[in-house]
Amino acid sequence: MMMEGGGRRGRRSRRLQTLLPVRATHRLRNTISFWYCDLKITALNEPLFYFGRKYARCLRGWFSMGIGFSLMALLAVSLIVLWELARTLNLYRGNIELKNFWNELLFGLSPWVSGLGMSLMDAVYLIISTLISVVVHEFGHAIAAASEGVKIEYIALFLAVLFPGALIAFNYEWLQSLPPFAALRIYCAGIWHNAVCCAVCGLAMFLLPLILYPLYIHGKSPMVLGLSSASPLSGFLSPGDLIVSLDGLGIHDPEEWMERIALIHKDSFLNSNYSKDSRSLPVHGRRKGYCVAGSLLEDVNNILLKDDQFDCPNELAAFVNVPCFNSSFLDDGSSGNSLHHERESRHCLTAKDVVKLEKCGDGWPAIETGTSSCDCSQNESCLMPSQMSGMTWVEITYSSPYSPECLQQGGNSSANHGGPESSASNCGGTFVFVGDVLSMGHSVQLTAYQFRWGFILGAYLPQMLEKILACTFNVSLAIALLNSLPVFALDGESILEVTLFFVTFLGPRRRGRVLQVCLWVGTLLSILAISRILFSIPF
């Protein structure tokens, strides 16, 4: 992918022209080859030159600010390049690792660079963002040149392999004849416009809920966009469903969904002190229980004993009695409890009926800390799901406001607590997931936006806008930083060359030598750093 500013790499003319014509005097030929093709455009020459000359004074002030930003960026990346040199020569033995900086800031594509994994839609977002960022970069050079009186010969849009780009062609000799500060404004304009593009994208992402407010509700409950083919929730959730809560705690957006799942997984890992025969309860940590009436337990005699292990029929779930959390039953199974006593403390119940009951124990986030099994009434027992090690019991409450059945009922989206099979309403319910909660969380694609008018076909629009803005931010930042590098064929070369002109104590010949040394060192070390990222080369 070529990320070049047109100022330095303007097309050289064989004869010196003080001013190029606005329209090309000869027919421009488009280039087509196996790996590269471009389209040269002259229709924008006059509008861009007119705009640049009309607002020349304001634009010069605007691009003068870009000089300061570009010089700071050049200094920053130069210091990083020098640090890489010191690290390569073993002059620095610290533990600071800048690979993540190069990966995330310089490229902004950390999920794609690592392993080079990219879906088709990711590639589309990357191509669109690259085209936007490169056009913004090149138009910065074009407008800056027009404000200095330099006319454009043509604008070229190109496609190299699969990546798009753009370049601006104007007379290189005419640029050389400009005052140094004016030329510096042109050379720095592309980097400056990419930085402004990053700021605009960041502001747009921040204001996107407000921008889409007339059409979408944001941050109320995450909506399901899709489920992976292997998702364990595929039989319970469908696209358009809203996830209301996890374990009774409300969920408002996809980030909160993943944060809550991470906490549940952490608690489950800390509480995974079960014996292999599942007879013991977790000794430490939080426990999730339900207050079950004694009348429901009187006729429950369906505990199966297989090889000294307790088992339940497939349609039922195993529950164990939790007597106030201070009983000797909470030991690791060697406290002398009889097998008969343990069998009487275990029950097989229907999960969808149990989740309707009051909760007990201190493992529920929606219940205040300090609760215990003794909070149940006298004729109730606190029963806790008996799970295998590594398995997590999670209550998921959802609503289906866009389902045809719910829309026929007037759009009542309030979730009930009867489970999908026994819901009195078709607008939602609560079900229990038992398994690996992390894989479950990643198997669902969510969005924080809900369409206001009950029409889910436009549900993907906010997510597409978010991804394009985020990707454009990253790619534009990458182009700005890459062009700030003191390397050959990028804007950093021209910026460094003009900057050295202001170092008056160096003669022209010494300035040329210093420039060549800086460019060679910068180019080699930049290649070294990029190779470490792309190919995981150890140094």
Image (cartoon, rainbow, N blue to C red):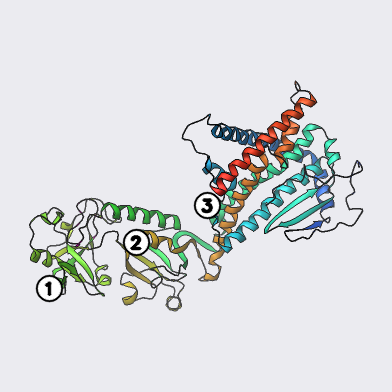
Which residue is at a point 26% across and 75% down the rendered structure image?
315
Choose top left, top right, bottom left or bottom right for residue 441: bottom left
Q: Which residue is mark 1?
A: 298
Observer-nearest of 465 and 330: 330
Is residue 253 something that shows in the picture?
Answer: no
Choose top left, top right, bottom left or bottom right for residue 327: bottom left
Observer-nearest of 418 and 388: 388
**Labels 1 and 2: the sequence-earlier one:** 1
Q: Residue furthest toward the top?
A: 505
Packing grade of label 3 (10 A; few <14, some 14-19, many >=20) is: some
Q: Which residue is mark 3?
A: 114
Packing grade of label 1 (10 A; few <14, some 14-19, many >=20) is: few
Q: Which residues are magenta?
A: 272-288
Q: Which residue is mark 2?
A: 436
In front: mark 3 or mark 1?
Answer: 3
Q: In x, y percent, where is residue 461?
A: 57, 63
